[in-house]
Image (cartoon, rainbow, N blue to C red):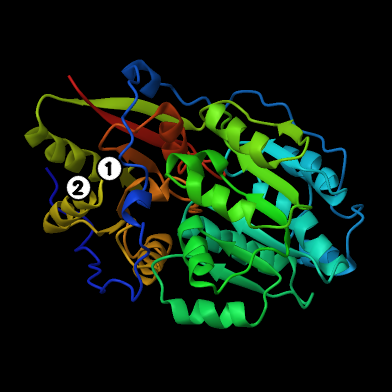
């Protein structure tokens, strides 16, 4: 067996952030949920990259949208050309002021679907303000980056309110009276409770990844936050799935929303899916090592349930010589940013994570997703394996199943 495991690990020994949200523990990835039984046969599926796909022909174009010229110029600079289905259907409705419920898979362009009408409204109406809630810090940061790019040179400013970082910079952003608030519910609620954030003037509300927000235990915070916004608001809610919990939130806050469903198949045809059987816990790590040393295993995410197990796996793999690090809700935001940067830039090629990384992680060259523990639900499985099989490349998803 080869012993060349691509070098030593990149260790991350940074200290925790200066501020810990009072409810971070329950928001670390939904690990307290009872796991659903999933038939292992659902983890087995051949990739079918040659499957004939219907080419979507949008009815609208970015160039023809009735939006501010600044936004049009920015979209052109961002090389936005043809609209995705969710963008094609949601943007015109959003521009008209309608409430929206969009059901679409992750990675389908949902951010632009709400960001374009939101930013256009903020430019047109100087008294309007918006709040966007996302389930994870990484997703909130990505939303902030895209909103900044779409609204560049418009004069709009925003505040990014996420946990794992110090309060003081966020207080400075809030002091500048931002037109848009982008954040995770826990930190937004912390600012509301401190009296540093007044939401009564927010007349545009966006909930991104509603199903994940609810799975992570944010339902009471979401209700409290939305109830504090302007009664005459526009609501734009986006979710990958639609269940009774999502319906309940929609019915509570939305006003006759236009329902847009462009959800595609549950799993990508570009992901080769299979199981790895093991008889006892002691054999799992050796089987994992056998997978990681294969020449085709170039860049891997390994999922497990808790902070502690993720750390244990990463330490064991590091002791075996792998370039590895970990990401979970127990790390400060600066630590998480550093780990993701190292992963994207190939300083490490194995990332061990809780489900905090299942959404909001935009890395195009991941070859393998490994479920070292069974996911909480089949929806969670879909989001995990959606990290691979991107940019037209076939990926591999392997799930450990005890026999």
Vertical comparison of 306 with 203: above or below? above
Q: Secondary structure at mark 2?
A: helix
How packed is label 2: few (under 14 Cα within 10 Å), some, or many (20 or more)? Answer: some
| Residue at (54% x, 72% y) in the render | 195
Where is residue 255? Give x, y as percent: 76, 39
- Describe residue 135's horizontal placement relative to residue 297 as left or right: right
Where is residue 103? Give x, y as percent: 65, 34
| Residue at image mark 2 | 309
Which image quarter holds the N terminus? Answer: top left
> Do tag 1 and tag 2 residues touch (Cβ < 8 Å)?
yes
| Residue at image mark 1 | 304
Is residue 51 visible in the rendered structure shown here?
A: yes
- Describe residue 198's horizontal placement relative to residue 136 as left or right: right
Which image quarter holds the C terminus? Answer: top left
| Residue at (11% x, 57% y) in the render | 319
Q: CA distance from mark 1 to mark 2?
A: 7 Å
| Residue at (70% x, 38% y) in the render | 101
Where is residue 191? Give x, y as percent: 51, 69
Sequence order check, earlier mark of 1 and 2? 1
| Residue at (30% x, 39% y) in the render | 32
């Amino acid at each position: 067996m080869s012993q060349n495991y691509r070098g030593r690990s990149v260790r991350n020994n940074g200290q925790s952030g200066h501020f810990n949200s009072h409810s971070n523990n329950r928001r670390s990835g939904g690990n307290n949920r009872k796991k659903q039984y999933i038939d292992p046969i659902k983890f087995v599926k051949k990739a079918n990259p040659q499957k004939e796909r219907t080419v979507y022909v949008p009815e609208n174009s970015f160039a023809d949208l009735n939006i501010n010229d600044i936004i049009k110029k920015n979209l052109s600079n961002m090389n936005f050309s043809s609209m995705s289905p969710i963008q094609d259907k949601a943007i015109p409705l959003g521009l008209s002021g309608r409430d929206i419920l969009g059901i679409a898979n992750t990675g389908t362009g949902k951010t632009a679907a709400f960001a374009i009408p939101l930013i256009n409204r903020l430019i047109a109406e100087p008294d309007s303000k918006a709040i966007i809630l996302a389930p994870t810090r990484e997703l909130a940061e990505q939303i902030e980056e895209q909103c900044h790019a779409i609204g560049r040179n418009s004069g709009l400013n925003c505040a990014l309110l996420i946990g794992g970082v110090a309060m003081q910079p966020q207080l400075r952003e809030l002091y500048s009276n931002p037109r848009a608030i982008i954040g995770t519910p826990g930190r937004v609620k912390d600012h509301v409770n401190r009296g540093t954030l007044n939401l009564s003037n927010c007349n545009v509300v966006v909930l991104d990844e509603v199903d994940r927000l609810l799975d992570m235990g944010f339902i009471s915070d979401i209700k409290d936050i939305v109830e504090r916004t302007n009664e005459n608001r526009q609501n734009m809610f986006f979710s990958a799935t639609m269940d009774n919990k999502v319906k309940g939130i929609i019915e509570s806050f939305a006003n006759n929303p236009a329902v847009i469903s462009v959800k595609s198949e549950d799993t990508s045809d570009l992901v080769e899916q299979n199981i790895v059987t093991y008889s006892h816990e002691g054999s799992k790590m050796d089987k994992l090592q056998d997978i990681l040393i294969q020449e085709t295993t170039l860049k891997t995410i390994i999922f497990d349930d808790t902070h502690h197990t993720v750390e244990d796996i990463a330490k064991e793999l590091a002791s075996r010589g792998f370039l590895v690090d970990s990401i979970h809700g127990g790390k400060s935001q600066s630590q998480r940013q550093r780990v993701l940067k190292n992963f994207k830039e190939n300083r490490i090629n194995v990332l061990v994570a809780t489900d905090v990384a299942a959404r909001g992680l935009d890395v195009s060259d991941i070859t393998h997703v490994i479920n070292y523990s069974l996911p909480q639900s089949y929806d969670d499985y879909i989001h995990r394996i959606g990290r691979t099989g991107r940019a037209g490349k076939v990926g591999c998803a392997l799930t450990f199943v005890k026999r």
